[in-house]
Amino acid sequence: MADHGGSQLPARSTDLVLEGGGVKGIALVGALEVLEEHGYVFRRVAGSSAGAIAGALVAAGIPTSTMVEILRNTDYRKFMDGGRFSNILTGKAIDLWVHNGIYHGDYLKQWLDEQLRTYGGPGWKGTFADLPYEDPDPDKVVAESRRFRLMVTGSDLTNNRLRYFPWDFGDYGRDPGSQRIVDSVRVSMSIPFFYRPVKWTQDDGTVTWLVDGGMLSNYPISVFDAPMGVAPRWPTIGVKLSGKPQAGLGIKNTIKGPVGLARAMLRTMMGFYDGQHIDASDAIDRTIFVDTGKVRTTQFDLGPEDREMLYQNGRKAATQFLEGSADRPAWDFDAYVEKHRQVTTS
C-alpha cells in the first residue's frame, strides 16, 4: 500500500466510517474483524448511531475478536429500558407524549461505559482525552478540537444543524477533551420517538435538543477526506448496512395514519442526504455494503440465528470488498486514488 505522504505509516493504515442501524450494528463488527485480519490498522473512526457504538470500541483499541464476544454476550433487550408500563401500548403513548420517546437510553450508556472501562486500559477516564490522535506528519496542523480518534454525529434540532462530536463542542461552550464519550454516543443513538431526546442546558439557560445523528447523516463518508487536489496518504473505508448501493431505491413506505406517516418521514429524512452523497461521489468504490436481511433497526429481541447472520454477512461483505468478487475488483487504494482523486501539481 503506497504511502502518499512520505511519513512512516503502518502498511495498511485506514480511517473508518461506520453507518448506523441500531441492532444491525452487529454486522459492522464482522466486517471490521476481516479488515483487522487483513492487516488494516484503524487510525480514526467516525460513526452514527450503532456506528458510534462500534466506533467507540474501535477507537478505544479493543480488538475486533473481543468486540465479537462482547456483542454475542450482550442482552439487547435491556437496551429497551422504558418506564413501568412501557411494554404496553398505553404506556408507550404516555411516554411519547410526556418524554418525547419511549425508552430512557440509560442502560445503553451504562453498558458502553462498562465495556470501555473494562478494555480501555490503565488510566481510562472515559473522556475524549483518552482517545488522542497524533498525525504522523509533524508539520501537519490539526485543530485542537479534532485531535481525537473518534467522531460521532448528532442532530441538533434546536439549531437545525448536523453536529460532529467532539469537534463541535466549542459551539456549546464545552471543552472537547473533557466530555464523556458515552454522552456523545447517547446523542448519536437517540432514535427519534424510540429513545428520549438528549437535552443540554447551556450557561445562558438555553436548552438544546439533540437526537440521532442518522437523522441528518447516517453515513458521513467524507469527514476525513483530504482537500480536493491533494492525494490522501491513506484511505477511508466505510461500512454501510445495506446490500448494494441501489438497495434503498426499492423500499416503499406504507402509510396508514399518523404513525405510518411519521415513520415514512423519518426514513426519508434519514436516507436523503446520504443517498444524494453516495450517488454523486466516489463513495461506492470505498464502501463495504453489508446485506442485513429483514432485520429492523429496533429489533432488540433478535434471536441467535439473526445475530449470527448479521455477523457472517459482515465478514462476507468485507472479504469480497478486499479480495474481489464477480461484481467488483479487489480493493486497491492506488487505483482508487488514480480514478477519483485528481492531484493538483504546481
Image: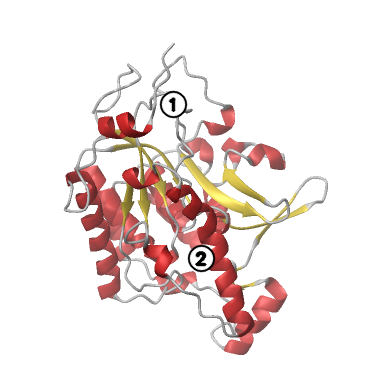
Residue drawn at (65%, 78%) of the image: 95
User: Can the viewer see residue 217 in this picture?
Assistant: yes
Quarter of the picture holding the N terminus: top left
Question: For residue 292, what is the image quadrant?
Answer: bottom left
Q: Amino acid at mark 1?
A: Glu
| Secondary element at tag 2 | helix
| Secondary element at tag 1 | loop
Quarter of the picture holding the C terminus: top left
In the image, 285 versus 316, the foreground residue is 285
In the image, 210 versus 316, the foreground residue is 316
In the image, 185 versus 75, the foreground residue is 185
Question: For residue 297, what is the image quadrant?
Answer: bottom left
User: Can the viewer see residue 120 in this picture?
Assistant: no
Instruction: Write down the residue under mark 2.
Output: 107
In the rendered image, residue 295, in percent from the top left (x then y), is placed at 37, 72
Q: Is residue 214 above or below residue 127?
A: below
Residue drawn at (40%, 52%) of the image: 54
In the rendered image, residue 336, in percent from the top left (x then y), is placed at 30, 35
In the rendered image, residue 245, in percent from the top left (x then y), is placed at 36, 56
Question: For residue 101, what is the image quadrant?
Answer: bottom right
Instruction: Write down the residue under mark 1.
Output: 134
Q: Amino acid at mark 2?
A: Tyr
Q: Is residue 203 above or below residue 73?
A: above
